[in-house]
Amino acid sequence: MSYSISEIAKMLNVSSYTIRYYDKEGLFPLVKRVNGIRVFEDKDFPWLRMLNCLKNLNMPIKKIKEYVDLALKGDETLKARYELILEQEKNIEKQLKELKYYKKQIDFKKAYYEKALEAGTEEVVKNWPNPHATLEVDELPK
Amino acid sequence: MSYSISEIAKMLNVSSYTIRYYDKEGLFPLVKRVNGIRVFEDKDFPWLRMLNCLKNLNMPIKKIKEYVDLALKGDETLKARYELILEQEKNIEKQLKELKYYKKQIDFKKAYYEKALEAGTEEVVKNWPNPHATLEVDELPK
DNA sequence: GTAAAAGTTAGAGTTAACTCTAGGTCAAGC
DNA sequence: GCTTGACCTAGAGTTAACTCTAACTTTTAC
């Protein structure tokens, strides 16, 4: 099977412009061209999936490009690529921890507004002690 | 207690420039000035904490400003602020789900490179079936 | 009281990641 | 054979979020 740029764009939930921009940045070095037109194939999907993953983990385009370049160099860069993946794993753990932390703050605020709405005024809750009042960095006083 | 802009910047892990930029954007309408100089006080910390939270949940400055403006209007905007918080709650859930999903992909890739490194070549794993080969959007073929 | 450090503003510059425009090619349907 | 729609490139424009500069004031330490 083969796929046009607009089909791929839809799959990744971005515009065709964006796919061309990624290509310009060197993220699709192995995609086939027929009369100058990009033709994506099934063999490209593993990389499209990986790209989608890295992009959604907020890896900058330049860093993704580095990964592409490493992969193109073959087996001699296995270690470097492995380390890049380990770095991402750590990054995910950190993001998960942070998200869970901020979720608590939002949950507190939700309860806060529910009480306020019940009373019709914020006054009744304004001085609620927030049990999640510290920052991760733990530098803001309570 | 009172705090200078550079102390606050350190607490939020950003530069003083950034704090001034936030102020310019209207995110600190209630911070005191003494001879033109910003003086942060204990009473400002609940908002600093909330700002830190929203910022780290990737809420755009403009949206944070909307929240600030709502809060300034008082009790008549309680409902709107509550809904904004609910939206954030959903946003967090979505981010958590996505993160967990992409974590699986990264974990797969980690095992992939571990095997490849063991063998000294990627060839042995290149055709591994990826059990997490679908996208969230479920539009990429396996 | 004076120098250095830290604060101020307005406004210009930077960066990443798109996003679009102009001017063109190409394949499909009528 | 000709229009329509999807593709192409180069390069300009946009947006968000800083980031910095210049010129000035205020505070702090000696």
Image: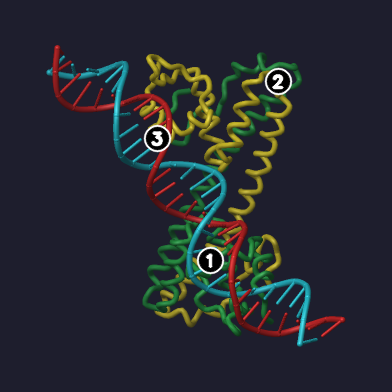
Chain colours: A green, B yellow, C red, D cyan
x and y percentages locating residue A129 in the rendered image: 57, 20
Mark 2 vs mark 1, CA separation in Å: 48 Å
The answer to whether residue B13 shows anywhere in this view is no
Q: In front: B128, or B137?
A: B137
Left or right of residue B63: residue B9: left
Q: Chain of mark 2?
A: A
- Residue at (65%, 64%) from the top-left corner? B135
Residue at label 2? A116
Residue at label 3? B17
- Residue at (51%, 53%) from the top-left corner? A92
x and y percentages locating residue B53 in the rendered image: 54, 35
Which picture quadrant has residue B98? bottom right
Residue at label 1? A22
Crowding at dot 1, Cα within 10 Å, few <14 / some 14-19 / many 20+, comes out as: some
Numbered tag placed on residue B40 in the rendering: none
Crowding at dot 2, Cα within 10 Å, few <14 / some 14-19 / many 20+, comes out as: many
- Look at label 2 and name its amino acid: Ala
x and y percentages locating residue A85 in the rendered image: 46, 63
Q: Earlier in the sequence, mark 2 or mark 1?
A: 1
Q: In front: C5, or B24?
A: B24
Q: Is residue A35 above or below residue A4?
A: below
Secondary structure at badge 3 equals helix
Q: Is residue C4 above or below residue B99?
A: above
x and y percentages locating residue B96 in the rendered image: 61, 48
Mark 3 vs mark 2, CA separation in Å: 35 Å
Secondary structure at badge 1 equals helix
Q: Quadrant of the N terminus of chain A?
A: bottom right
